[in-house]
Structure formats: C-alpha cells, structure tokens
Image (spheres, rainbow, N blue to C red):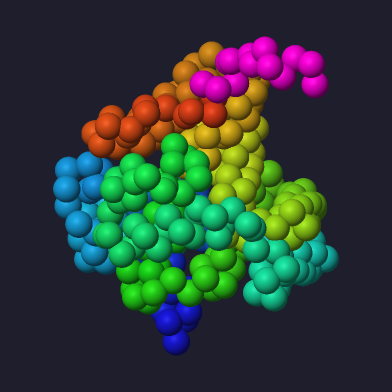
Amino acid sequence: MRALIYVLSYAAFPIFGWSCASRIDDRVARVGFAFLAGGLLLTIEATLFTVVGIPWSAWALSIPLLLLLPLPRTAASTHPVRSLPLGVTVVALLHFLLSIITTQSISPDYVLFWGTKASRFALARAIDPHFLLSPFPPPRVDYPPLVPVVEAWGALFSREMPWIAAAAMSAVWLAAAVPVIRWLTKSWEATAFWTAAMCASQAFSGGGGNAEPMLVAFLSVGAAAIVANETFIAAIAFAGAALTKEEAFLVIAAILLTAGIRRAAILAASSLGAASVWFLYQWRFGMHVGYERFAMQTHLLSSTLGS
C-alpha cells in the first residue's frame, strides 16, 4: 500500500507543470512535458523553501504551484498512432521497468547517495544542510537537488521510502519524454528508436533510481525542441537538466553551439538560472559554491605522472 501511495503522488507533477505546457497542442505530449516541468518547479520551490526556512509538507509545496494553473482553454488534439513504433516504445519501456522491479537494473548510486539523500530530506522536511555538512556526509554533496527532491516528494505521502517503487519511477521519466519527443520530431519511428536505445542503455547500465533517466529525458527533449524551433520548451528542459546533474552543462554547451546566438543566450540563461537556485542554497549554508568535480579537473597532480 505504501508503494502504491508513493507512485500515485507523482500524479501531481503534471498538475504542477501544466502552466509550462500550454503551447503544446497534443494532449498526451502536453501531459508528458507538464510532468517534466512539474518536477523542475517542485525542485526550485523545495530548494527555496529550505533557504528561507519553511519546512516541507505536501500542502505547503502544492499550494503555490497550484496557483500557477492556467485558466481552462480549448482541449488539445491527439495525433494518429503508428502501431509498430508504438509497440516498440511500449516494449522498451516495460523492459526497463521490469528490469528495475526485479532489481536487475537498480543503480549502486541510488543506494549510496540519491535514495539516501531523498529519505533523509523527507525526514528533515528540507534539503538537510546538517546532513550534507556532517562529518559523514553522503558522496557528491555538491550534486544539484532535483533527483533527491522528487524522490523525497513521494516519501512525504508514503511516510517511508519504498525503495524499489521509488527506483521504478525512473522509467516514468523516460515515458513522459516519449510523447513530447514524438510531438517535436513529428515522427513515431524516430521516437521509437530513441525509446528503445535509451531504455536498453538504462536497463543494462543500471539506471534505476539514478539521475541518468531524468537527465536523458530533459536533454533529449531540449535537443529536439531546438531542432523544432521551440525555444521555450528547450529552456525549461535545459533548466531541468541543470538541476539534475552537473554533467548536463557539458552537453548543453555542446548543443548550444548549433543553436544560434539569440537562442543560445536564452537557453544558457535558463540553465544558469536554474543552477543558481542550487548555488544560492550552497551559499546560504556555507557550503562550497559550485561543483567541486569541475574544480578538481583543473589540477594536475605530479605524483601521477609516472603511471
């Protein structure tokens, strides 16, 4: 029952992000993008709550985001479905999901720090600075907060961390990106290929509970949106990627080289703006501001030259 409550709590994400998806004229794609945007908005809000000292609760986090809901508008249309590509897409997603549920594709990082942070944050009802600054912190304390925040969201409802169910939600992030990519590319075949490739990659690399499914979803939607000339959607997607994992900036920088000066400036601003929310948290609680791994890559240790 707790696992079911945890899973159902994620149904709030499309509601939270609905205001960001109003330009999408396909009903399923709108729900998918709203799910991604809802996770981003929840993360920004939860981080700012911690910065100003407001404890998390389901109602406290929900009410401000519900106020963003737009007024009702004409219902979106649905586009024809291609049976074979849809079948490939469904099988690929089920393969990844079942790989997680049977614990064959659960990431060690989920146990080492993503899930550990999530359960601690849910208990503390905050992005717990005492935990991150303790003598025995989890690895990678400088990682941005989207993954543990969205994993902690469900634990606020279930009152405990249903570890396998929480990891299984990784497949939902890829599933949410599927209709958005189909809408942006106008191709079921391209979408089926992307889904099969990403789900197989995540299944065999142990992506369950890790940040990679979210990162892949955000970056893929952002890249497809640039090709489709949907700058607003790309900006939201890149902001989500920036708050998911620090490696996002390397991919975003490479993508922006093809985006043109004006669009690149907008997309870079959205990415840096999202990351600045995390940097504000780090500054507020006296942590190292930025990403320590990037800083360490600029140092050359002479003791390793021999090897």
Q: Quadrant of the N terminus?
A: bottom left
Q: Position of residue 172 (x, y in %)?
A: 57, 63
Q: Nearer the viewer, residue 259 or 96?
A: 96
Is the residue 297 above or below the residue 27 in the image? above
Q: Position of residue 120 (x, y in %)?
A: 37, 60
Chief SS of the magenta region? loop
For the point 27% across and 60% down, which residue is it? 124
Does 222 sit left or right of 4 as displayed?
right
For the point 41% across and 32% down, which residue is it? 275
Task: Name, please, the residue furthest toward the bottom.
Answer: 1
Task: Name, please, the residue furthest toward the right.
Answer: 84
Please indicate, yes or no, whether residue 239 appears anywhere in the rendered image. no
Q: Position of residue 158 (x, y in %)?
A: 37, 76
Report which quarter residue 178 is drawn in: bottom right
Q: Nearer the viewer, residue 91 or 106?
A: 106
Callout count: 0
For the point 44% across and 41% down, which residue is it? 141
Is the residue 54 above or below the residue 208 in the image? above
For the point 63% across and 42% down, which residue is it? 220
Q: Nearer the viewer, residue 247 or 86?
A: 247
Q: Which residues are magenta?
A: 295-307
Q: Position of residue 195 (x, y in %)?
A: 73, 55
Does 45 sit left or right of 289 as displayed?
left
Please indicate, yes or no, whether residue 111 appears anywhere in the rendered image. yes
Q: Quadrant of the C terminus?
A: top right
Is the residue 180 above or below the residue 62 in the image? above
Q: Nearer the viewer, residue 216 or 66?
A: 216
> Is 92 part of what is drawn in magenta?
no
> Is 300 part of what is drawn in magenta?
yes
